[in-house]
Image: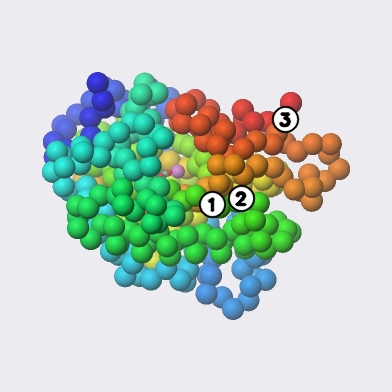
Amino acid sequence: METQLLSAGFRFSTLPPSYVRPEPDRPKLLEVADYHNAPIIDLGCADRTFIVQQIAQACQNYGFFQVINHGVLKEVVEKMLEVANEFFHLPVEEKMKLYSNDPSKTTRLSTSSNPPKEKIHNWRDYLRLHVHPLDKYAKEWPTNPTSFREIVGNYCVEIRQLGLRLQELISESLGLDKEYMNKTLGEQGQHMAINYYPPCPEPELTYGLPAHTDPNTLTILLQDTKVAGLQLLKDGKWLAVKPFPNAFVVNLGDQLQALSNSKYKSSWHRAVVNTHHARISVASFLCPSNTAVIKAPKELIGDESQGIYRDYKYAEYYDKFWSRNLDQGHCLELFKNI
Ligand code: OGA
Ligand code: NI
């Protein structure tokens, strides 16, 4: 039986058992402090060298950063959040037309993370779309709301520009040529997860998304402006990253950890839920092309005979990631050189 969509209009008064985490694996929300010194990088700054320095520091010490003055129009962002909200408020029959648990589908609505593989589910529904090239994929996207394709398409194009620009800055911050990442990662894919976390009767017992790192290269996350829920791990402690006005959160993914020979680490993050408010987030994932070979350049391997990870094609990593569930440990560990 397929797992039930949460955004079906039914308000649960207790958490269904298949969502309840065992005691040691609960979010302990009262222990989570705010992430006061989460790095914020002003991309509008005229001093490029300064931006690169800040990115180097943030990537090395945090694995993530927030960007402001990033060039994505405010109106485009606002419309994206609005249409996401409208989509998840459509009647459940309408949404179910798009439902699938098959990760190879390029447009699908699903719930939790990977329902066929997991024992405990997560308090989330999500619409997952491949978005690049736009003219290949947009024709598969929902037509209800009627403005969906246009609004999401505009958003994705702007986010891609930002992502490619960030990868130039990150390449430079690693001491590599500015074009290094964008050249070696091939014709990069771009996926999107529009996440919807409904109000949850018992948020202490479950997650919207449990601790994970993203399997791709770079993730640009747009948070709901009003409802917090993203938490990041810093020195063994979970900290809450409140939405910052007009900012995106940029998370380093596993491919950045691999190609930087672990100089930069992918960021461990999770999403928690709350009793009263639904929360929306929009994650844009830049991914290497399926045939790109992921390996660290000599400059980052130094005198060692080999890098920390073996060379592999991105398609192999992606398949491995989706064959598992988020509670099974870090996928990148499976790609270490012995
Ligand atoms: C994700 C993710 C966090 C959030 O979609 O991979 O980590 O705040 N989302 O929704
Ligand atoms: Ni994530």
User: Quick check: 292 above or below 10?
Assistant: below
Mark nearer the N terminus (3 vs 2): 2
Q: What residue type is disc 1 on?
A: Gln
Label 3 element class:
loop
| Residue bearing mark 2 | 185
| Residue bearing mark 1 | 188
The answer to whether the residue bearing label 2 lies less than 8 angstroms from the nearest atom of ligand 2 is no
Residue in the image at 68% along x and 47% along y: 260
Q: Quadrant of ligand 1?
A: top left
Is the residue marked by circle 1 packed among few (<14), some (14-19), or many (20+) residues within 10 Å?
A: some
| Residue bearing mark 3 | 337
CA gap between label 3 and label 2 equals 21 Å
On the question of residue 61 being in view, the answer is no
The answer to whether the residue bearing label 3 lies less than 8 angstroms from the nearest atom of ligand 2 is no
Q: Tell whether 10 sits left or right of 230.
A: left
Q: Nearer the viewer, mark 1 or mark 3?
A: 1
Q: Tell whether 290 sits left or right of 136.
A: right
Is the residue marked by circle 3 packed among few (<14), some (14-19), or many (20+) residues within 10 Å?
A: few
On the question of residue 259 being in view, the answer is yes
Residue in the image at 49% along x and 64% along y: 161
* Cβ atoms at labels 1 and 2 below 8 Å apart: yes
